[in-house]
Image: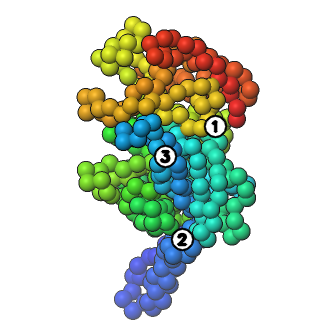
């Protein structure tokens, strides 16, 4: 409720004080009407929409005879539909072989990835069964309406401690060119709400309980929260995963260029994408792409060698920074069931694999 009023000073010192007092009362009522609801009430409404995501994936382990072992990870997510759709961060689930979603009531539910965009670090997963009774479905807010200085809060599982609440402000609206990050192609909210490992993928709420962002990463020298947290805006997440055809490549890669490209004998020494891991059941797995098996440190960077080196997908060359958004758009343009070629370098030989888009 908005109240508009004008208070005028009395010309007489003996004039009644009632008009001035009335103005003060109306001003106080106006402020109360615009105040945010108590945070504990908002948290009580939305916390059951927040989930903990436990992942399992294969990792290279030099201590193992076969080089591979299964490891687990923990992230967060938020339920956005009664059918069991959950938003999270791409890096939480991108190359995972198995997902388990844990709700506030302690119930555990298997899930699968429906779509993932690693360039923007957002992903959509779906429960294999309906969510438990009483689980709140969060509302997606309009991130364009959020201003720097607005209060916001995060709910997630920092260090695996589920349903932890942290509160702060929107510190800035950022684009990747102004942020030191592996995220290359998105819009981000910067917040001083405490974010730690395990918060990734969880919701950033406004003070009405609407989701305005999906937690992505932090910038830290200590390894913990230093007040520099970043969340992908809700409008970006909606546009990529809810309003457009989504797909899940299921692949983790590193870009190789220059000296490393020549060392790996990439034809012409040009840039390419070295496959690190491939998730079971994903688009890349069905196409026959292979991940690496030998952990190595090259120029201070930890990578896995031995996997396929992707040279091109369809007519899109892969390797230069500008190639990856083009590749995403190409794959999005494919019809469900449509086949496409993947050109790879494997064990020194160029091969053509055939993939099929399945949504």
| Residue 79, numbered circle | none
- Could you tell me which residue is drawn at 39 percent across and 7 percent down? 268
* Residue 214 position (above or below residue 31): above
* Residue 188 position (above or below residue 168): above
Q: CA distance from mark 2 to mark 1?
A: 36 Å
Q: In the rendered structure, are the residues bearing label 2 and label 1 in contact, judged by CB atoms less than 8 Å apart?
A: no
Looking at the rendered structure, the secondary structure element under dot 1 is loop
Q: CA distance from mark 1 to mark 3?
A: 16 Å
| Residue 281, numbered circle | 1
Residue identified by numbered label 2: 43
- Could you tell me which residue is drawn at 38 percent across and 12 percent down? 265
Q: CA distance from mark 2 to mark 3?
A: 35 Å
Q: State whether residue 347 appears in this view.
A: yes
Q: Position of residue 174 (x, y in %)?
A: 40, 43
Q: Quadrant of the C terminus?
A: top right
Sequence-wise first label, 2 or 3: 2
Q: Quadrant of residue 211?
A: bottom right
- Could you tell me which residue is drawn at 45 percent across and 36 percent down? 66
Q: Nearer the viewer, residue 58 or 18?
A: 58
């Amino acid at each position: 409720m908005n109240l508009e009023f004008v208070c005028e000073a009395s010309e007489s010192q003996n004039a009644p004080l009632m008009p001035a007092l009335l103005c003060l009362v109306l001003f106080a009522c106006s402020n109360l009407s615009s105040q945010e609801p108590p945070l504990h009430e908002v948290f009580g409404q939305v916390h059951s929409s927040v989930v903990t995501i436990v992942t399992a994936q294969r990792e290279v382990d030099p201590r193992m005879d076969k080089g591979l072992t299964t490891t687990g990870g923990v992230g967060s997510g938020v339920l956005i539909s009664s059918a069991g759709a959950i938003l999270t961060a791409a890096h939480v689930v991108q190359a995972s072989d198995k997902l388990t979603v844990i709700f506030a009531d302690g119930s555990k539910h298997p899930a699968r990835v429906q779509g993932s965009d690693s360039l923007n670090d957002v992903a959509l997963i779906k429960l294999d069964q309906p969510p438990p009774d009483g689980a709140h479905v969060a509302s997606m807010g309009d991130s364009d309406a959020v201003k720097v200085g607005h209060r916001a809060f995060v709910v997630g599982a920092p260090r695996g401690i589920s349903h932890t609440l942290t509160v702060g402000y929107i510190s800035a609206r950022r684009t990747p060119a102004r942020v030191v990050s592996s995220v290359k192609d998105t819009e981000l909210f910067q917040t001083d709400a405490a974010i730690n490992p395990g918060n990734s993928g969880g919701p950033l709420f406004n003070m009405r309980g609407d989701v305005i962002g999906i937690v992505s990463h932090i910038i830290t020298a200590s390894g913990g929260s230093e007040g520099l947290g970043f969340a992908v805006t809700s409008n970006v997440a909606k546009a990529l995963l809810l309003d457009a055809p989504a797909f899940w490549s299921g692949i983790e890669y590193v870009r190789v260029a220059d000296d490393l490209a020549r060392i790996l004998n990439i034809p012409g020494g040009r840039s390419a994408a070295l496959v690190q891991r491939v998730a079971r059941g994903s688009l890349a797995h069905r196409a026959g792409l292979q991940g690496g098996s030998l952990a190595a440190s090259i120029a201070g960077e930890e990578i896995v060698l031995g996997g396929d080196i992707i040279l091109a997908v369809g007519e899109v060359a892969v390797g230069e920074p500008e190639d990856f958004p083009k590749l995403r758009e190409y794959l999005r343009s494919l019809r469900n069931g449509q086949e496409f070629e993947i050109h790879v370098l494997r064990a020194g030989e160029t091969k053509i694999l055939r993939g099929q888009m399945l949504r």
